[in-house]
Structures are given as structure tokens and as C-alpha cells.
Amino acid sequence: MRVKKLIAATAGLAAVGLLAGCGANAGAGGDATAGGDQKVTVWLYPVIADEAKHKAFWDETVAAFEKDHPNITVDYEIFPWANRDEGLQTAIAAGKGPDLVYLIPDQLAAYQKSIEPIGPYLSDEQKADILPNVTESVTIDGNMMGAPILTSVNPLICNAAAFKEAGVTDYPSTWDDVLAMAPKFTEKGMYAINYPAAPENTLNMSFYPLLWQAGGSVFNKDGSAVDFNGKPGQEALDFISTLAQEKAIEPDALSTNLPLEQTALAKGKVGCSWTNVPSEVESFWGAENIVVLPPLKKDKAVAYGTVGSLALLKGSKAKEAAGEFADFATSGDIVKPYLTEAGYFSAVTSTGALYADDPVMSKMEENVPTATVGELFTSSRAVMGVLAPEIQGALLGQKSAKDALDAAASATGPLLSQ
């Protein structure tokens, strides 16, 4: 086993759109030696914040795998999160990409033409073990593009102390519940929900869950057109716009991306949020005040949750060996310490409940099956870039929900044709 030190990702000039056109020989990956031995290269990122613990997990995982696979050597590198796309794009374009790389779902879509579907390289047992919503989150055009190693969920979290101060005794489960409780919060100079609308915030964490809850979607089935400006999208934006107009959302959050500690949320003046997780608010609210609930519901209860997975590049010269390592490293008995140390949830059923003894995390874990990443298309990030400012304009009262969404839909035409 040869383990490289933590290094900075190489900055690159290639854009994601350009990368998406790269062919099957886009990466170099590992290789086979004259004696039939194979080397697998893996690029990772610091999922566990403690660098030593993160490295220790991968050291032990690689050592265990190599013990059972004496003809395969695994080299891994841990890169910083910053500039990770630029570094990977440059490496692939130069034919020096790894065999396996850690990617999240929107990256799977962006790099789709440079990724080998990994499903055929995973065991039937491993694929059957993966949660259905997680499998869906890494599947594009019917192909599993990543071997899931972790998942997350952003259901609804509420501040018990804020509810007590506002004189509200029932927690919300539907949009109507939020609209009904909002006046009681505003009467106390408080806010019913947290909703950061500055365009730099990802819509995955804010608007898209509402769109999904109303039964809508960002794109049509084949990604040839957007669908967010239909009736569900208008209902979602009208809902959040009504709350903004009634001052049930912190006004500064609609236009400014404030540090968390400066927000009304951190000051205990907000009832609920689906844009935050318990670990972000615990130091402000106190663990005893965190109430984890299912995601809000209009037509259905849906939350956002990401999936981290190991993706196999088409340029790999050791695909079978890389697939074997991905299958091993993402199996339930291996990932348990990785997940609990990082504070994520399992993508497979065989781990069982990881947080049964934690009153907050166990409730989060219960909501993992409600999570989705939405539709995966190459233009997903670009579409978000034109939609976010229009949503903000509607929330600031500059446009109606219909006009804002229609304007964004019109602007997506060139993005979808790329």
C-alpha cells in the first residue's frame, strides 16, 4: 500500500460543460503490471473533519482490501474541497485522472460522459443492499454512476424554545400549518421559518424541496426542458412569497448571506428550518431544544439529501480491480466507523441504525428514506444559476411568482441545448 500525503488540487481552466464532452479515454487511472498485478488510484476528499481519523480509516480499509486481494495495490490521495472540480477536470483532460473519485450527484451528471457506469462492477449483494432512494440518486439514464458510500437528509428542524416564546404549542407538518402559525411568531417579533434567498445559496436546500413537496420537478423527464414554472412551482413560490410578505421570514436573509451567528436563526428567533441540520444550530439552540420532524408536506413529504459515492472513470485501465475496491469500501461492515465519525447516514440497509442512542441523530436517520437529490442532468447547476435570482426577485416583491419562474424558464433555453 502506498499512501500519498494531503495535497492541494491542481487548478484547471476547463469548464464542466467542456468536460462533459470528453470521450472514453479521458482519464489515465491505474494500470496492470507485467506480472498481472493491478494498481487502483482513488481520489478522496475530507469527509471526516479530523484529518488523522480520515486518513486512518482509509489506511485500514485499503490494508484490509489488499490483504484479501494480493494482486491489487490501492493508492489514494486526499484533496481539499476547494477547487476540486478544476483539479479533476484538468487531470481528466490530460489523461491523468484516477480510477475512482468521490463525487456527489450533481457532479455525476456534470461528468457523465467521462464516467463508466459502475453497476456492472458491483456485486448483486451490494446493489441489493443500497436504499432505493439512494440508488435513484446515483442513477442516470438507467445506469448506476456511483457506488454510494454515504447519504444525508435535511428534514424539518424546529426550535422548542422559540415555539415556547411565540406561544405556539403544535409543530407544523404541512404548508398550511406554517401559514397558520406564522402570525403568532411575527406578533412576537420572531420568524416562522428560515429561508436564505441570496442567489449564492443552493436551491437544493431551499426552493427545490418545496417544489418537490408540491409534486413538481425542475426538469421534464428527459431534461430537454425545465418544468419548474408549472403549477407546482408557482404554488411553492407563492407559499414562500406569502411568508416573506407577512414578515414571517427574516428580511435580511432574503438579500444578504449573513454569517450564521449573526442571523435570527442563531439568536433563537426562528421557529423552523429545512436549510440547516442539527449540528449547525446546536451551539445556538442547545441540543435539548432541537426537534427533528419529517419534511413539510403539501402533496407529499420530501426532503433534500445528498449522496457521496465512488465513481469509476472511463479512462481507467483497471476497471475490474477498481470496481472490486468500490464494492468493498462501500459495504455496510466497512463504512460504519466512517459514517459515525463524519456524522453522515448509511446508504445501505445492512448497517442497521447507526444512531439509535442519539435522540437527535436517530430522528434524522428515520427521515433518510424521504430524501432525494432531484433530477440529474448536465445543466442542473447552470439552471440553478438563472433560477435563483428570479426567486429572490419574487420574494422581494419585485415580480409575481409566475413572472419570475417564466423569466427563468425562458433564460434556460441556451443552457439546455449545450
Image (cartoon, rainbow, N blue to C red):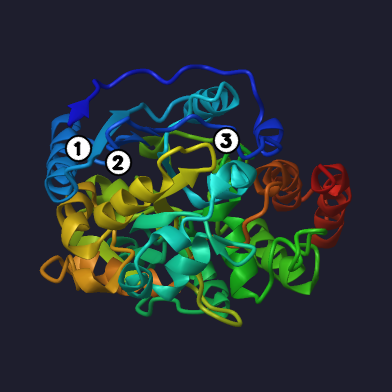
- Whole-percent x, y for residue 24 in the image: 62, 40
Residue displayed at 67% across by 39% down: 20
From this viewpoint, is residue 196 visible? Answer: no
Q: Distance between the residues labelled 1 and 2?
A: 7 Å
- Whole-percent x, y for residue 76 in the image: 29, 32
Query: Is 164 on the left or on the right of 221, as rendered?
Result: left
Asked where in the image residue 142 lies, by quadrant, the reply is: bottom right
Compared with 351, 148 (above or below) is above
**Quadrant of the rendering where the N terminus is positioned:** top left
Q: Are marks 1 and 2 in contact (CB under 8 Å)?
A: yes
Q: Of the residues under marks 3 and 1, which one precedes in the sequence?
A: 1
Q: Say what secondary structure mark 3 lies in.
A: loop
Query: Is 293 on the left or on the right of 194, as rendered?
Result: left
- In front of the other: 76 or 172: 76
- Residue type of the residue flagged with mark 2: Val
Mark 3, residues whose alpha carbon is within 10 Å: few (<14), some, or many (≥20)? few
Q: Which mark is residue 54?
A: 1
Q: Say what secondary structure mark 2 lies in.
A: loop
- Residue type of the residue flagged with mark 1: His
Q: Distance between the residues labelled 2 and 3?
A: 28 Å
Residue lying furthest bottom: 299
- In front of the other: 74 or 233: 74
Mark 1, residues whose alpha carbon is within 10 Å: few (<14), some, or many (≥20)? some
- Residue type of the residue flagged with mark 3: Thr
Q: Which mark is residue 256?
A: 3
